[in-house]
Image (cartoon, coloured by chain):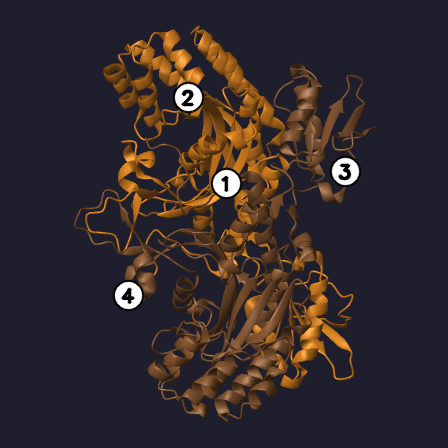
Chain colours: A orange, B brown
Amino acid sequence: MPKIAPLSGFPELLPEQRVVEREVIASLSRTFELHGFANIETRVVEPIDRLAKGGEIDKEIYVLQRLAADADAKAELGMHFDLTVPFARYVLENAGHLEFPFRRFQVQPAWRGERPQEGRYRQFTQADIDIVGRDTLGFHHDVEVVRVMVEALGALPLPPLSFQVNNRKLIQGFYRGLGIPDVTTAIKVIDKLDKLPEDTVAQQLVEQAGASAEQAALCLRLATIRVADTSFVEQVRALGVEDELLETGLTELAAVIDGCASATSERVTVEANLRIARGLDYYTGTVLEVFMAGYERLKSVGGGGRYDALASDGKTTYPGVGVSFGVSRTLIPLIADGVLSGSRKVPSAVLVAVTDDDARDASTAVATALRARGVACEVSADAAKFGKQIRAAERRGIPFVWFSQADGTHQVKDIRSGEQVDADPATWTPPEDDLRPTVISTAREIEENQ
Amino acid sequence: MPKIAPLSGFPELLPEQRVVEREVIASLSRTFELHGFANIETRVVEPIDRLAKGGEIDKEIYVLQRLAADADAKAELGMHFDLTVPFARYVLENAGHLEFPFRRFQVQPAWRGERPQEGRYRQFTQADIDIVGRDTLGFHHDVEVVRVMVEALGALPLPPLSFQVNNRKLIQGFYRGLGIPDVTTAIKVIDKLDKLPEDTVAQQLVEQAGASAEQAALCLRLATIRVADTSFVEQVRALGVEDELLETGLTELAAVIDGCASATSERVTVEANLRIARGLDYYTGTVLEVFMAGYERLKSVGGGGRYDALASDGKTTYPGVGVSFGVSRTLIPLIADGVLSGSRKVPSAVLVAVTDDDARDASTAVATALRARGVACEVSADAAKFGKQIRAAERRGIPFVWFSQADGTHQVKDIRSGEQVDADPATWTPPEDDLRPTVISTAREIEENQ
């Protein structure tokens, strides 16, 4: 038997920490559903050849095999490493039963056998929203899906978030209009701007993408444009590049920025940042990444964009646009730092004390009456001295202790204030704020101190 | 690229089917939380030597390995095959941070590489509740945990369920008092009564457990006792066997039956069934299985019991009592049979029509006003003819379509009745029953036709 110890990269939460994760997922789900997104879950496994596409991710795929399998049996199944690959397969498999445009949200774990570090885990939960069309998908869905995620994350008690949005057509059109020989390579090089100094990036644009020094300088100027309104349009035009695709990109990006404006707040901002490219090949229009103030070391905590071919079966193509939020990547560091915590270890708002073991049925009857009106409670495990029962409630974070007297009267004590009042199990209800465990966040304070 | 096809044993649900699973899990969670059970999730992997104990289950364990691992690398991790093994490990690992008795519920998938059949899947979701003590755990928690599951399952729209309860002490005490030489083997033999004829079981009791023919006959008579009240106590006493452990078992079983009585209904019954043994070695007192009317072919859809040593680190022992409900085992056959279905494919209660593409912003403003009051809605994907937009709502099961006129007036149409009325986006709300997708169940009709 192995020693009991945590497994690196497989974080688990204590009950009071799990309160945070559950409330965050419930809040996200509420917002997604208000906007008509249906929930699905996919199986956790896919055929390996659907997962392994020769990319960087391949070596991190976990494959699955029965313990009893023959030694030379070839493994056929792997664990999904994101929610996009299984979703694309689900759309193809069930296309005949789905209504398009199909809005779905999905909150599930994914697995990657990578080196664990803060914000990077081998098992991690993501929350994805996507809108998928059959053959076509109106551009206005780009605005919709970004705005929904802005609203969803804006409802969470997190440190300030910044949505950094760009558009692949804008970059591609600019580079094409500028006359860069290898546009695809140029995008990949520009994407390294957060890791390499500007000089090096300019040099690589010349050496790898065939740009002139002047062209490289303009690419870098484009990449420095970052504003929270649509003034980027004039800034780009001032660079003097003309191209039809560039114009489309400018119009689309301006529509996303404008469309999200009324959903922003001091907790969530949306900016046009013309440096954002996202390395992944499948993005074709809107691209975005989400960053969290004070946690820039996590890199992006979310991201997404438009892909004109999320899935295709050869006959029909399914374009999509979506945004993914890293639930584990965001919450586990915040919980570890004490920024987010649960208000108590148990759902119970009330501990019903037990006077002596013969009176357990009476205490259970009180609990049943409270539960009938939605008040979560538990009956004391044993008929210890009242002081000990109160301390048991305290250790669990239960705010109220209920005492029943032999004469049939009842009293309830708020163990935080010490106040004890007469109460009737058929009518007494705790204050709304005490009904359920809540998330305690110091994020607001962090923000105010900055 | 493999052909897109379902994987046997890994069922997935369409959005309207997933409504059923989500609502069932939400309902179960509500009941568990009303009783003070805290939610946890464990990682899906455990060290293989914690999973593989030399039992029947071993060959069904899925092991996990990185695709890039060396060919001769030894796999160290396996997927959990139930929620009990990871929970026991979690208790040991976090004992210093938990408050005992620790009530927890856990709803997660588990994996077994077994041959798929109706009710048996390779990935399946379970909902478990357990109460765990440190060193000791009062017997009254047996009553509590069974009653909580009776209440939780009684709140679901399922065909009638039957809790069949017994007590290991009762059987062991009876066999011991009777003088059966090999009590452990006798229990295993009696456990085969649902597969083998009585004669064969009697013969095996003689041959394998060393019983006399008369003792075997009494064992069979004990196993035929099945009543919905505590009259089994007198029936057992009438068999004339005396034993201290038997008396304890009778008292405990009577307490469970009595304690659950007020939670039973025509949808959930609780019976003492002295044939229930559960083959698993670790049960030490209360044992139970749950069966569903019309679905006896699934065998039990839930089960559990008391184990005096759920976990132990050599110094401290953690006794527990718990019940597990097979969410997938129960729901997937009921969904396939059309007994349970979701009322619609999307959360939206309203489709906001779009008059022409320039009026999309006006429609979005209506949707925003409705969402502010908790009404889920979506804006039509395109400004097609109204008839087409109404049919799009119909296909999704959305009950209401909203029309805005150029003069600033609004009307909402119930597309089921055809009724169309003036409405104000700032105040109109659909009937409570239409707010969210619901579960439609024909279980009640099935019951009435029986």
The residue type indicated by label 3 comes to Thr
Relative depth, front residue between B109 and A341: B109
Discs 4, 2: same chain:
yes
> Where does label 2 land, which residue?
A224
Q: Quadrant of residue A343?
A: bottom right
Residue B170, x across and y down, in percent: 50, 84
Of marks 2 and 1, which one's residue comes earlier in the chain? 1
Secondary element at tag 2? loop
Q: Mark 3, chain letter?
A: B
Mark 3 closeness class: few <14, some 14–19, many ≥20 residues within 10 Å:
some
Mark 2 closeness class: few <14, some 14–19, many ≥20 residues within 10 Å:
few
The residue type indicated by label 1 comes to Gln
* CA gap, disc 4 and disc 2: 53 Å
Of marks 1 and 4, which one's residue comes earlier in the chain? 4
The residue type indicated by label 4 comes to Pro
Q: Quadrant of residue B268?
A: bottom right
Relative depth, front residue between A425 and A45: A45
Secondary element at tag 3? loop
The numbered disc on residue A2 is 4
* CA gap, disc 3 and disc 2: 47 Å
Say which residue appears at 56% left-offset and 24% top-offset.
A141
Say which residue appears at 44% left-offset and 88% top-offset.
B215
